[in-house]
Amino acid sequence: MSSNSATRPQHRVVLTGLGALSSIGIGVAQFTEGLRTGRSGAKPISVFDASGFAHSTGCEVTGFDPDTSIHNLDTENLGRATALAVSAARMAVQDAGPEPETLDARHGMISIGTTDGASAELDRLIESELEDGPGAMDPELAARVSPARLSLAIAQELGLSDVEPVTLATACSAGNYTIGYGFDAVRSGEVDYALCGGADAMCRKTFAGFYRLGTIAPECCQPFDAERKGILTGEGAGVLVLESLESALARGARIYAEILGYGLNCDAYHQVAPDEESVGRCMRLALENAGVKPDEVDLISAHGTGTKANDITESRAIRAVYGEQPPRTVSLKSMLGHTMGAASALAAIACSLAITEGFIPPTINHVRTDPECEIDCVPNESVPARLRIVQNNGLAFGGNNAVVVLGSYTGEGR
Amino acid sequence: MTAVIADWSAVSPFGIGRTAFAEGLRAGTDPVRELAADWDSPDERAGVLAEFDARAVLGKKGTRSMDRVTALTVTAMRELTERPLDAERTAIVLGTTTGSAQSMMEFTGSSLTGAEPFHVDPALMPNVVMNCAAGRCGIWYGIKGPNTTVAGGRAAGLQGLQYAVRLLAAGRADTVLCGAAEEYSRARAWLERHARSLEQSPEYGAPLGEGAALFTVCREAENALAEILSVRSRVVLDGDPRTALLACLRGALEEAGTRPEEIAAVVSSGATGLTGRAERAALTELFTEQARGRVPALAGFGDLGAGSAAFGLAALLATPGRDIGELAVLTSVDRDGAVGCAVLRTL
């Protein structure tokens, strides 16, 4: 292969464009404002019929009109998750600056993560099958169920042929997985840029499953709180533009942050329960890869789902790595709900904005920290802060952990 | 750096393990069979494993709620774990279309038909997430490195191979167990039947196939089977996969430092319908007839979905009498617009 890590120069990798669609805001400006003011995306679920569930609060993206950002594809023929992904990619590329025509002359990667892929469409197909029999399924809908379309549709919308389209389906850490993959490919020089991120749409399947597991909170998501009652399912998309530092400097691009490194591992322990030691090992892998010591980290964006099990396991793992005085540790899921495959992508965007805009987004809905979660979760209100290094955690079913480390770009060499 | 394929395994309609696959391929056995009534499928025939029972193959412990694609994958990985592996330095990279469409649709179905909408079986929850098979393999064999699921449809096998090579290049693992799996199911049969109906193609009725093919990929190994010289992928923009595949192939051949006439074996993913026609057209344009006929065609297996490129690679490795240094090309074309190819050298 052309990637010769021993002899090839390794590029520094920076983030130069962000696109976000979330329940607390569409577009980077609204999203930033939502993070800064501690907005909650929770509202009654409307995208599927939630009657029969005792409580059905979720974090939907409202006011999303795909036609405002998607120009070349027929939005009628895109699944909801795909429309969110394509829209986020459009925003990110626009934010980064280059015209898609300029990108097309370069070799790139489009890597999108997802938990549920086209499950919103599969839900509708099974509904139709139960009503009218399998022969009556809508063929257009059936042709749309491959999650590969999440990354392919972005390439097709932007007119990019010389790109590697990769959909990573590593569940709820998939966003971080894609950032890691883009990081390695840009770092080695194999691709000139990468559009990385994640997307998921709300669906009955996932809501019903988490509800049955007893992990859906009735009204709000309260990570690390003594009275926390679980997750809220959410939806959204986040896409980040990655390129080499040379490339960004050459075109005078704004640099949000530098990607310093990442770590991946697998608990190999349990399909749904996280493993403290393994989660800690993943953080160590990421810090080692980033060349960062624990005491240099200013902020952790936790996976922080708001379930009993996750928050205790994750905060213990953080203390095992960081000792008695870990960095402030926030959960964006308190505001965004659990956006599944988009979660760690939206969180990485939030981390970049926190670095650039100089504030720590809060963990909202917080009343009293669980004594078993011994961290400072920055309750309820954002605080100004000068952040140099931020760690973004993503954990998932299957024990698929992924941790990304971001740093402020100040023009100095690291 | 280069990466090599040190080992492989397959679970196929020919049976469990690489020997069963190689022998079935050599004998020219037809893997497509009449479907038993309990499939409740709209298809009459498919390339399925007859009487595959996870409990019988893997034991009762841990298999009660295991779905078919996961069981096929865990079974296929068994042969690869016979050699010693460093748990933390071994990765799993698995290609899929959408995990198990059957598991997903049944799960939502039980929410819609149960007395209460939350009457779903919590034990089945992990099955409705696409990384189930990869995560489960990690647990089954205690493999703790990166654990990645690539949802690429027919292009998944080569996308996964490219991902695996990058993990090795970046030093994130020393060994990658990589490949792809697809299950046959009633749900997949209906989805595919409807999706294909949009395409006016003479191969509308081509049967579906299933199985898992996996490879041990590492930087170097004694007695390695093949060296991976290049893996490339690209996106179809104009509706014609032929031009995108040709561009992809030219890039890969250049990176591998070779030319079309030097390629001794070409393995197409055996796509059906219009994408298949485009794939064959591109290969006919670039490669000799002899090279295209070198490895038994997989078209007879039925549409293997995400498994297609992985089975193409397995078929290449199972083909006897390959000379050292012989160059081979693998291609894949997905109807949603992904194309991919790889250039390998026999070791």
Image (tube, coloured by chain):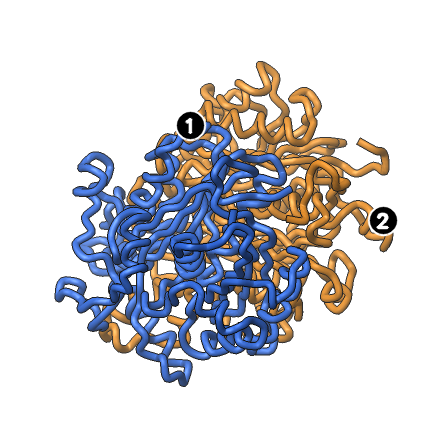
Chain colours: A orange, B blue
How far apart are labels 2 and 1 at the CA level? 41 Å
Give the residue at mark 1. Answer: A275
Residue A372, position as x, y percentages in the image: 45, 20
For residue A280, say whether it is visible: yes
Which sits in the foreground, B186 or B295?
B295
The local secondary structure at tag 1 comes to loop
Instruction: Please give the label number shown on residue B109.
Output: none
Q: Along the line of sight, which residue is nearer the eye, A133 or B280?
A: B280
| Dot 2 alpha-carbon crowd within 10 angstroms: few under 14, some 14 to 19, many 20 or more | few
Asked whether, in this view, residue B256 is left or right of residue A320, the answer is right
Would residue A84 be seen by someone viewing this image from the given angle? no
Question: Which amino acid type is marked by label 2?
Answer: Leu
Q: Which residue is tagged 2? A: A249
Q: Closer to the camera, B272 or A76?
A: B272
Q: Horizontal and vertical percent for residue B276? A: 45, 74
Picture quarter containing residue A335? Answer: top right
